[in-house]
């Protein structure tokens, strides 16, 4: 007589995520030095070394008792973006300063870990950068090995954040190049090579960051440790200035076979 033996697998323990960085930001967006119609936006994003058993992140506002939003992974990104506001005061009416709690949960809604960050009343940067190359939005004929440049007063903020997006890419919001964070004395950047005849967006943000540190003159984000997991955090306010441009066209080509054929016809006459 055959005996059927059934082994019951032990439940797999939930794996706590390994957090790389948590970023909470109020930003004021410009296009070539001109503010957007509704320029202010509030953002929360999280980067991971490893997500473990993470399924979603519940976020609770200061003074709240239940989450105001739940963040899920979207194309590798874990982020929340608010609607757009006319003024910083309007934004802060809906997103006040204080403790923001992020609860990291698995698919059964079990709590994996919890992080609370105090987002403070941060001073606005004084000015956005002023681009000098490209010199105007929509400029064409930009080199495929460019040196982008701008002017800025080093006292206008704590640090700069630089990035470049390929607007013709299937994922235009994914940075082709980025450089985070750099000194306020930085006034140029060489991120190439770029593709020919391609539309790009260059962005430079002037940031004020709570608790930012400076090592050998370079800005470094502070860190905190929760349950033996050490990660960077950024509590910031920034002015983002964007500028779009198009790189040089592909070189024209000459069909030598076609020219030869035309010459042959001419000789026959």
Image (tube, helix red, strand yellow):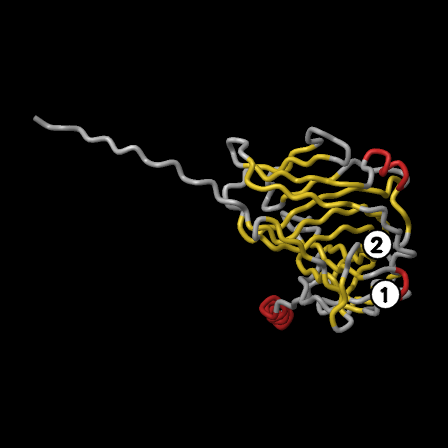
Name of the residue lying farthest toward the left: 1
Dots 2 and 1: beta carbons under 8 Å?
Answer: no
**Observer-nearest residue: 175 or 73?**
73
Q: Residue at x 90, y 61 (%)?
A: 156
Residue on which disc 2 sits? 241
Q: Residues within 10 Å of mark 2 (few under 14, many from 20)?
A: many
Which quadrant of the rendered structure holds the N terminus? Answer: top left
Q: Residue at x 89, y 42 (%)?
A: 88
Dividing the picture into quarters, in which one does residue 155 lie?
A: bottom right
Left or right: 213 in relation to 89: left
Which quadrant of the rendered structure holds the C terminus? Answer: bottom right
First of labels 2, 1 by sequence position: 1
Give the image location of residue 233, x and y in percent.
Answer: 70, 53
Q: Residues within 10 Å of mark 1 (few under 14, many from 20)?
A: some
Label ID, residue 150: 1
Q: Residue at x 66, y 58 (%)?
A: 176
């Amino acid at each position: 007589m055959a005996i059927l033996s059934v082994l019951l697998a032990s439940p797999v323990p939930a794996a706590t995520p390994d957090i790389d960085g948590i970023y909470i930001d109020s930003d004021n967006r410009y296009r070539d030095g001109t503010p957007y119609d509704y320029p202010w936006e509030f953002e929360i994003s999280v980067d991971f070394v490893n997500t473990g058993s993470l399924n979603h992140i519940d976020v609770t506002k200061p003074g709240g008792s239940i989450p105001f939003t739940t963040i899920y992974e979207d194309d590798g990104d874990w982020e929340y973006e608010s609607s757009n506001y006319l003024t910083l005061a309007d934004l802060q009416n809906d997103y006040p300063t204080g403790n923001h709690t992020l609860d990291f949960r698995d698919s059964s809604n079990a709590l994996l870990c919890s992080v609370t960050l105090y987002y403070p009343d941060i001073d606005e940067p004084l000015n956005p950068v002023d681009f000098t190359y490209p010199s105007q939005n929509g400029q064409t004929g930009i080199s495929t090995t460019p040196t982008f440049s701008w002017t800025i007063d080093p006292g206008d903020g704590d640090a700069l954040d630089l990035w470049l997006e390929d607007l013709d890419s299937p994922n235009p919001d994914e940075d082709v190049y980025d450089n985070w964070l750099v000194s306020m004395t930085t006034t140029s950047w060489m991120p190439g090579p770029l593709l020919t005849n391609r539309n790009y967006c260059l962005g430079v943000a002037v940031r004020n960051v709570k608790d930012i540190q400076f090592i050998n003159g370079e800005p470094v984000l502070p860190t905190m440790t929760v349950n033996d997991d050490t990660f960077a955090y950024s509590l910031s306010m920034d002015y983002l200035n964007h500028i779009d441009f198009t790189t040089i066209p592909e070189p024209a080509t000459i069909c030598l076979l076609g020219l030869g054929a035309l010459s042959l016809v001419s000789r026959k006459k």
